[in-house]
Image (cartoon, rainbow, N blue to C red):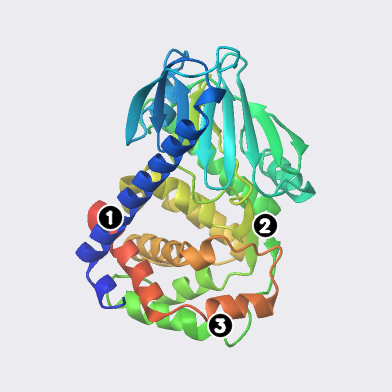
Amino acid sequence: MSIIFRNRVTYRLYRVIKSKFLELKYFLTTLKYFLMHFRNYEPGWYNINRKFIVKADIEVNNHFYNTILRLRPFIKLYNLFGSKDCVTDFVHGMHPDMDIKIYPQKELIKRIFKQPVLNNDYQKRRDLIQQFIPGPSFSINTNYEYEERLLIGESFTLSKNNNHQFIILLNQFKNLAISESKINNIIDSKNIKPIFKAYSDIISKKIQIDLNFLQNLLSTSHFVVSKGSDLAGPNIIMSKNNLILIDWEPRELKSRAYWSDLVNLILNTDPTGFFSYKYRLIFLELIKAVDNLNLNINDKNFINTLAAANSFWNLPNLHFLDFDHLTSEEFEIIINSIEISDLMTAVSSTEILCNKYAN
């Protein structure tokens, strides 16, 4: 596997094939569900894609259309044998860990999870983040279910017209990290440092970075409640000239490195701006305020190093770690299970980003 991932073209092809396979798998799962439960839907036309079952005549806004109805693959089916007594003025969403019902007329979303994930910790974390970051109002019904307001707005794509709002959002994340980051010395173990050194040695041969800065980023003891790597255009909407975040999944609300949300948000939204040093000052202010580092690094090394650290922490076996509920022993076991092929995956991800977006 490590030989495969040494070639970034092969790695990119692998990611595309894997992504398409999962899209087809989820589409067939949704289609199977509809065919098995067609009596629960009234007669009529239905749009079925890899995540949602939508009655064809439901009124939608632009954001709803772009983020739900346009998902591929999709098919349009007529439900001939459905029941007329069913209420179908909602969208039924199928996800691996939950079902979603969206009621456009009521401006309401209901999420029903398959596991009891909505404990008091979720409420506290989301309330804490939403003190800084705008999000929809919500209420928890049970440990399995919560409701939130369906926000009406446009799908967010960065442009000259909304760049100011995006900078405001970035500063809101920066203020969250500065105000609410907590110290956890979970990474202090000497047995963990060889993994960081191995990663530094590999990536420094591929990309121009600052080794000391990378070590500081990877071994930080400062963590903050995070919105997760799903920070992207589809989960950000323009509503009344403000940017508001949606899709607050419990599995994403973890305590992560204080800089990770800012890096993910910018890389997902404006990667070209990230690699052209547009946001360097925001990161410098954040790192100085939280980690007390005075950095004298050229722009290219600074940005490349941030991207390299982010790729490492976004490895699948590290991404969902919660540094509020993790012991040093547990973390050591997880991080020492990382193999060279995993490190090469992170290196390939960073190399692809740098080559694609750097000037």
Residue type (three-letter) at the residue carrying disc 2:
Ser
Front-lying residue, 238 or 252: 252
Residue type (three-letter) at the residue carrying disc 3:
Ile
Which residue matches tag 3? Answer: 192
Which residue matches tag 2? Answer: 181
| In-image side of 331 versus 168 (left or right) | right
Residue at image location 42% in from the left, 35% down from the top: 31
Residue type (three-letter) at the residue carrying disc 1:
Ile
Q: Position of residue 322 (x, y in %)?
A: 64, 62
Residue 110 found in image quarter: top right
| In-image side of 178 versus 305 (left or right) | right
Task: Say which mark, if any, is on residue 17.
Answer: 1
Q: Secondary structure at mark 1?
A: helix
Q: Position of residue 182 (x, y in %)?
A: 70, 61
Q: Earlier in the sequence, mark 3 or mark 2?
A: 2
- Rounded to the nearest whole Å, what is the CA distance between mark 3 and mark 1? 33 Å
Front-lying residue, 319 or 141: 141
